[in-house]
Image (cartoon, grey):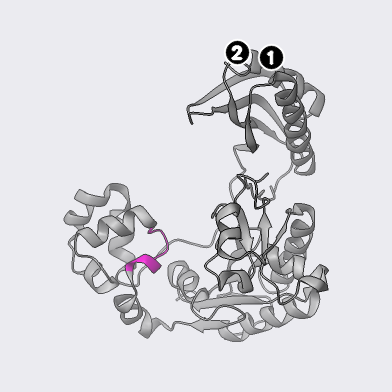
Amino acid sequence: MKKIIHIDMDAFFASVEQRDKPSLRGKPVVVGGQPDSRGVVAAASYEARQYGIHSAMSCSQAYRKCHQTVFIKPRFDAYKAVSAQIRRIFLDYTDTIEPLSLDEAYLDVTDNKKQQASATIIAEQIRRDIYQQTGLTASAGVSYNKFLAKTASDINKPNGIKVILPEEGEAFVAKLPIGQFYGVGKVTEKKMQQLGIQTGKDLKEKSLEFLKQHFKSSANYFYNVSRGIDERPVKGHRSPRKSLSNETTFAHDIDDIKELKSYLRQLAEEVADDLQQQNLMGKTITLKVKYDNFEQVTRSQTFPQALNDEKQIYRICKNLLRNTDAGLRKVRLLGVGLSSFNHQASEQVQQMEFQFV
């Protein structure tokens, strides 16, 4: 029987901002774009969440919900530094760590460095270490598989822990609303509800054939987790990433080529910086353009030699921009990405990408 912990930092980006800027403590804080922009909420403090503000909401909508909200531009370097600090804490307990993002990870502590038989004790020690070393709180889920551990970590947020024992797993899932299942998004939730599936118990009552008919490749996963079964291992070494990109949605649609090139230069600099930090070089450069009617086009060029230099990326993207209708038509969004990497490092750090203005 495996012993799995899922650690999830509480309102991570917003909590880092409140930690570093004491004047923000106790206030509704949004990390993302500005309220008069098309930016989105990357993170919301718990004070902001009380007003119904949540991640991926437009910043203008967040402002309408609470005019007292403080809007902060993301500081990814600060978040990455804290994430690395937390990762070092994890390594004190186990080498089998699977990061999902900067602020959450699975840990397999079945065999751990502390020779501690209780995964619950380890989870509490990790939460204590995180608070003592970073001043931030984390929530934890503890169980015998990844699905239950991740589900459990949401139950007693913020700054809480939930343990689901092996003998409790199936009964716990039976009562779980289908919308709280990891892997069930809004579209799938609506579809399941239309099929009469409201809870884990309802899902369990459906045959595998029924699930295959309606949910294709996800059928086996749903069939198993409705029974408290999840055989996926915690992957100690994640596969190297295949692409890296950044994009910007403009506050106003743009048809001025000089202005678009200015944004392109900024995007090229940001992507090049991320590539260099992660020791990556890519052979394929892709430009994404979204027009004011939401039509989207991409233009790509592949080279025999990999690169990560901002000037080269910018020059190539300028040429790719000429092969679009930018300037003749108004542009809503620009994006720059690289792929076909030469992996120069054995381990890649996951880059979280958010769209904000």
From the viewer's side, name the closer residue of 310 and 306: 310
**Residue pointed to by mark 2:** 323
Q: Quadrant of residue 72?
A: bottom right
Q: Looking at the image, which residue is at 37% across and 59% down?
A: 184
Task: Check if residue 7 falls in the magenta segment.
Answer: no
Q: Quadrant of the N terminus?
A: bottom left
Residue 34 coordinates in the image, percent (x, y)? 68, 51
Task: Check if residue 180 falls in the magenta segment.
Answer: yes
* Mark 1 and mark 2: Cα distance apart in space: 7 Å
Q: Looking at the image, which residue is at 28% across and 55% down?
A: 219
The reply, left or right, for residue 350 in relation to residue 182 is right
Q: Which mark is residue 269?
A: none
**Residue pointed to by mark 1:** 319
For residue 236, say whether it is visible.
no
Q: Looking at the image, which residue is at 55% across and 64% down?
A: 65
Q: Quadrant of residue 55?
A: bottom right
Pointers 1 and 2 in contact (C-beta within 8 Å): yes
Tag 2, which secondary structure? loop
For residue 8, above or below residue 207: below
Residue 237 coordinates in the image, percent (x, y)? 61, 54
Q: Amino acid at mark 1?
A: Asn
Q: Looking at the image, which residue is at 60% across and 44% down?
A: 38
Residue 42 coordinates in the image, percent (x, y)? 62, 55
Crowd tier of the residue under label 1, counting other residues whose Cα lies within 10 Å: few below 14, some 14–19, many 20 or above:
few
